[in-house]
Image (cartoon, rainbow, N blue to C red):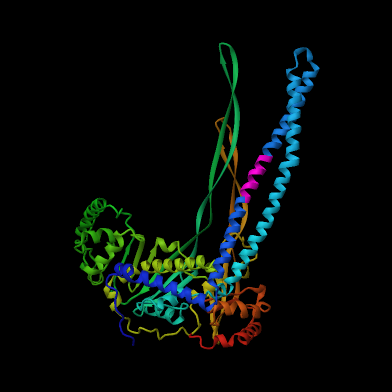
């Protein structure tokens, strides 16, 4: 059994003084190594990029010039039309009434002549100028595109060498405390389910979009992003405008007044609402009987006076709760203040049900660490909700809702080596910062780091499949939705994809995916309403009827190993003619494609192995 790694006793200090810079430097080195292995001519690319940016800048300038001249041309056309129109009118009217003087015909002739002169300037000078500018723009655009293509050619090898799981590879070289998996191992999944009570499934109305797993001192965690759907009453509003007249009398006689009124009506009908959530779930055997919830307090922690007022007000409420709980029969579940007013007020967790175990976790050092997270606005401050449910902890932070942890190689593709490095390192910096500060509330607890699970390494494998259902759903959601969408489903709506069955087929999983969405049908309700004219009116209210539709299709998930580049260059072409609609998805060494039946799947598998056997050798599964 591996030994305990050096604990992190002060998480914020460790991040600020060590991990942040180490990870940044390692990401920078990792990128430089990628550049070197890709044999990129860095200086040559910089020269090509400088040429392109110079041309692009010139192009922008010429576009502004062309826009200026086109605006001037539009103005002249309007002026010419007005000059001719007004001039002709004045001339005709003036010559028809010469007895009134020569001002009108002279002005008319002058305007006509002005129009002729402006027209000549437009045709002879301005239009050729604009045509010349447009020609230059086409040439500049062609030159700029050629130069940009050359820049992309400079970085072609580098762009092909980006891979999934790069943040995890950097993590291995940075800190021994956090271990990230290549994918959500079925052993770790089974361990979390069987040992810690992780739900195998979050319900029929929730599908997993992304997953990242690992461990801290052998204690497993999984960070998952899901899409959930629930049926709610959706309001629909319609309106009509009515008018009527009333007759009034005064000393001068009678008169009518026209009245206008907008009548509105609202109806409610059931329909789906979709929400995404990212949360981190962590298993630890310490304090197994403790349950509590905490939410961000919303306190302005940047103002000490406001914090003091908040703590004072909050503790009055907690004092009252503690007194009321003294009347309960079970003293173990009674709320008792921990003796640190600031911690009690800002952390919350006053619904905790085991004071002894709560104090085992939140020692004075843990309290100090937590307060350091909550009261410091950088990088995120108090932005997380936490639920402890026995041996499972769940963290949902605002910052993680905005960040994509997938490390998709496509996000790093660029034509400028310096810009690419900035993009790459910035993403890695954001990755470690977002992940670390989701874990920080847990790392803040010394017992969670020193308490290793009995097994440490998961020894129980799921007997039915090679991969977790979480990974099945992630891969299904990464395929073209058309592969699963029910025939009548509205393509504008998301799909909820669920695993209905999964079984091993060698090292592959053959999975049945049940997809559901909704058929949408326009409907209209007619609502009667009394108007200001004293009559009832019918208001049409248009709404949408949602009818659930389902479809079940097969999918194969394989661990083919390799890299993003080897897949793009070899496997993709090899299976394109086999896979229905050319639909497949590769990431983190996993390949998914729609299943067409066992014989067809075997044919695809042989096609893959025939071109990928060397890459598959040496892959650690």
Question: Which residue: 39% across, 64% down?
Answer: 396
- On the image, the x and y values in percent for residue 577 come to 68, 78
Q: Quadrant of residue 139?
A: bottom right
Residue 413: x percent and y percent? 55, 68
Q: Quadrant of residue 277?
A: bottom left
**Depth check: 347 or 425 in front?**
425
Relative depth, front residue between 560 and 379: 379
Residue 494 shows in this picture = no
On the rendered image, what quadrant is the N terminus found in? bottom left
Total of numbered circles in the picture?
0
Classify residue 197 by image quadrant: bottom left
In this picture, residue 72 sits left or right of residue 562: right
In the displayed structure, 145 sits above or below 282; it is above
Residue 544 % position (x, y): 59, 53
- Whether residue 143 is visible to the viewer of this picture, yes or no, is yes
Secondary structure that dominates the magenta span: helix
Q: Relative to residue 357, is residue 177 drawn left or right?
A: right
> Residue 507: x, y in percent?
54, 86
Outermost residue toward the right in this view: 96
Which region of the structure is painted magenta?
A: 62-73
Left or right side of 404 for 86 = right
Q: Is residue 178 above or below residue 242?
A: below
Whether 65 is among the magenta residues is yes
Q: Tell me which residue sits at (72%, 48%) in the image.
A: 131
Q: With respect to residue 105, does 22 lie above or below? A: below
- Quick check: is 522 in the magenta stretch? no
**Residue beneath the point at 63% across and 66% down:** 149
Residue in front for this viewpoint, 109 or 434: 109
């Amino acid at each position: 059994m591996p030994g305990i790694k050096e604990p992190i006793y002060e998480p914020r200090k460790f991040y600020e003084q060590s991990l942040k810079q180490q990870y940044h430097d390692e990401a920078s080195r990792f990128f430089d190594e990628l550049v070197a292995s890709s044999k990129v001519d860095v200086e040559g690319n910089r020269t090509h990029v400088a040429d392109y940016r110079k041309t692009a800048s010139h192009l922008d300038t010429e576009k502004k010039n062309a826009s200026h001249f086109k605006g001037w041309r539009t103005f002249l056309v309007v002026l010419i039309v007005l000059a001719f129109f007004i001039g002709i009118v004045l001339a005709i009217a003036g010559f028809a009434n010469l007895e009134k003087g020569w001002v009108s015909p002279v002005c008319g002739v002058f305007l006509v002549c002005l129009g002729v002169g402006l027209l000549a300037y437009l045709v002879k000078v301005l239009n050729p100028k604009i045509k010349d500018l447009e020609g230059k723009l086409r040439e500049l655009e062609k030159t700029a595109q050629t130069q940009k293509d050359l820049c992309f050619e400079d970085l072609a090898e580098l762009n092909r060498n980006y891979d999934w799981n790069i943040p995890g590879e950097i993590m291995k070289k940075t800190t021994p405390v956090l271990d990230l998996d290549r994918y959500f191992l079925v052993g770790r999944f089974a361990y979390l389910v069987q040992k810690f009570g992780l739900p195998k499934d979050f319900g029929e109305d929730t599908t997993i979009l992304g997953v990242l797993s690992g461990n801290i001192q052998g204690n497993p965690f999984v960070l998952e992003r899901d899409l959930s759907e629930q049926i709610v009453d959706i309001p629909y509003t319609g309106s009509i405008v009515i008018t009527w007249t009333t007759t009034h009398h005064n000393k001068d006689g009678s008169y009518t007044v026209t009245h206008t009124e907008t009548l509105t009506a609202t109806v409610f009908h059931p329909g789906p609402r979709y929400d995404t959530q990212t949360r981190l779930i962590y298993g630890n055997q310490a304090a197994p009987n403790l349950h509590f919830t905490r939410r961000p307090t919303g306190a302005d922690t940047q103002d000490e006076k406001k914090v003091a007022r908040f703590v004072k007000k909050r503790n009055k409420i907690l004092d009252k709760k503690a007194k009321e709980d003294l009347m309960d029969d079970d003293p173990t579940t009674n709320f008792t203040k921990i003796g640190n007013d600031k911690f009690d007020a800002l952390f919350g967790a006053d619904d905790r049900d085991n004071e002894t175990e709560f104090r085992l976790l939140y020692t004075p050092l843990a309290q100090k660490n937590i307060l350091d997270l909550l009261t410091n606005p950088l990088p995120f401050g108090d932005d997380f909700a936490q639920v402890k449910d026995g041996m499972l902890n769940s963290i949902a932070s605002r910052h993680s809702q905005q960040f994509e942890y997938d490390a998709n190689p496509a996000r790093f593709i660029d034509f400028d080596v310096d810009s690419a490095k900035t993009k790459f390192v910035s993403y890695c910096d954001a990755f470690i910062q977002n992940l670390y500060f989701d874990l920080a509330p847990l790392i803040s607890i010394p017992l969670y780091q020193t308490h290793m699970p009995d097994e440490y390494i998961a020894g129980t494998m799921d007997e039915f499949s090679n991969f977790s259902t979480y990974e099945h759903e992630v891969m299904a959601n990464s395929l073209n939705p058309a592969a699963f969408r029910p025939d009548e489903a509205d393509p504008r709506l998301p799909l909820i994809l669920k695993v209905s069955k999964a079984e091993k087929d060698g090292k592959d999983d053959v999975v049945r995916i049940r997809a559901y969405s909704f058929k949408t049908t326009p409907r209209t309700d007619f609502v009667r309403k009394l108007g200001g004219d004293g009559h009832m009116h019918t208001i049409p209210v248009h709404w949408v009827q949602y009818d659930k539709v389902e479809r079940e299709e097969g999918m194969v998930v394989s661990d083919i190993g390799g890299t993003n580049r080897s897949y793009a260059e070899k496997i993709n072409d090899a299976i394109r003619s086999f896979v229905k609609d050319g639909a497949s998805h590769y990431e983190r060494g996993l390949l998914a494609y729609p299943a067409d039946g066992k014989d067809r799947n075997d044919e695809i598998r042989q096609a893959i192995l025939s071109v990928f056997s060397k890459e598959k050798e040496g892959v650690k599964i």
